Image (spheres, rainbow, N blue to C red):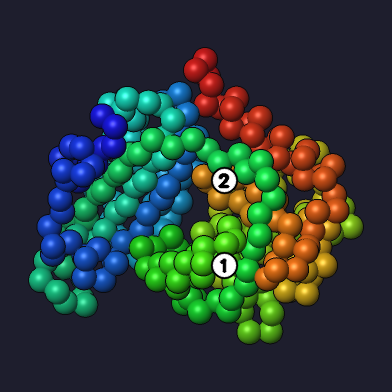
Amino acid sequence: MKELGYYNGRIGELSQMSVPMNDRACWFGDGVYEAGMCRNYRIFAIDEHVDRLYRSASMLEISVPVPKDGLKLILDGLVRKMDTGDLMVYCQVTRGGGPRQHAFPDGPANLWVTLRPKKINTAEAPVGLITAEDTRFFHCNIKTLNLIPSVMANEKARRAGCYECVLYRPGGRVTECSHSNVHIIKDGTFFTAPTDNLILPGIARAHLINACGQLGIPVSETPFTLDELMNADEIITSSSTAPCVRACSVDGTGAGMKREDLFSALKKAVFDEYYSQTSAEA
């Protein structure tokens, strides 16, 4: 298949798939999701993605309808049905279905999966960023389907001709971007926001931190501000689809771009890991 859809065991071409209108995703966006990259039919960091999906579901009291090992088997089987092994694998679990009511329905959760051809973004050129106040709720550590503030922020970035929108809370604390984590390097140290309830604990973020450990780069998981972002030696965004992206401007002002040695070393480390774990011989 070129693009695949899966819904509670039903499989088909994505454009031909449909879901019931009473799925709680339609009423309330009542669910959680994961998205990761696949190369050579091998899903990168699958254990981390599955663990985070179940953790998000648990925090919303959603019971995933299959065990972790069962979900991994489903995903691996679906990947093998595709015409290419270079894919984005998207999985979501919604609370179930029923008449529109706020209280939880009886019955099992619904499992959705989509697969689309996609290669990981190596981001060869530095990108521009903009900033906006973070108007999201206070459970950003849960990877829920409720993404309207992020959608609006990313559209704002697109209209400004920029790659991402950096979000900040009152007082200037930087949290993350519309669909990426954001980090800075200053005086040789890698700074990244702590994994509290204001950011998603990104998997690419965790792999960057591991790369820092391998390279001997100190890491500080402490909040940083917009002023510190603007005065950083390097600004880096990370996501599963684009693990290490270098920024060159913020709100139209040049920023970062002062420690190419550290940025290049980090980028090489995370991509070496990705290519190694997704090689045909892995």
Q: Position of residue 179 (x, y in %)?
A: 51, 59
**Between marks 2 and 1, how big is the CA–CA gap?**
20 Å
In the image, what residue occupies the spot 43% across and 60% down?
Answer: 143
Horizontal relation, residue 66 to residue 143: left or right:
left
Q: Amino acid type of disc 1?
A: Ala
Which is more toward the observer, 179 or 204? 179
Q: Is 80 situated above or below 208?
A: above
Which of labels 2 and 1 is toward the front?
1
Quadrant holding the N terminus:
top left
Tag on residue 276? none
In the image, what residue occupies the spot 51% across and 67% down?
Answer: 159
In the image, what residue occupies the spot 66% across and 54% down?
Answer: 127
Q: Is residue 70 visible?
A: no
Horizontal relation, residue 143 to residue 199: left or right:
left
Q: Is 54 situated above or below 96?
A: above
Read off the residue under disc 2: 242
Horizontal relation, residue 76 to residue 254: left or right:
left
Read off the residue under disc 1: 160
Q: Earlier in the sequence, mark 2 or mark 1?
A: 1
Which is more toward the observer, 128 or 219? 128
Q: Are marks 2 and 1 in contact (CB under 8 Å)?
A: no
Q: Position of residue 275 (x, y in %)?
A: 59, 27
In the image, what residue occupies the spot 62% across and 43% down?
Answer: 123
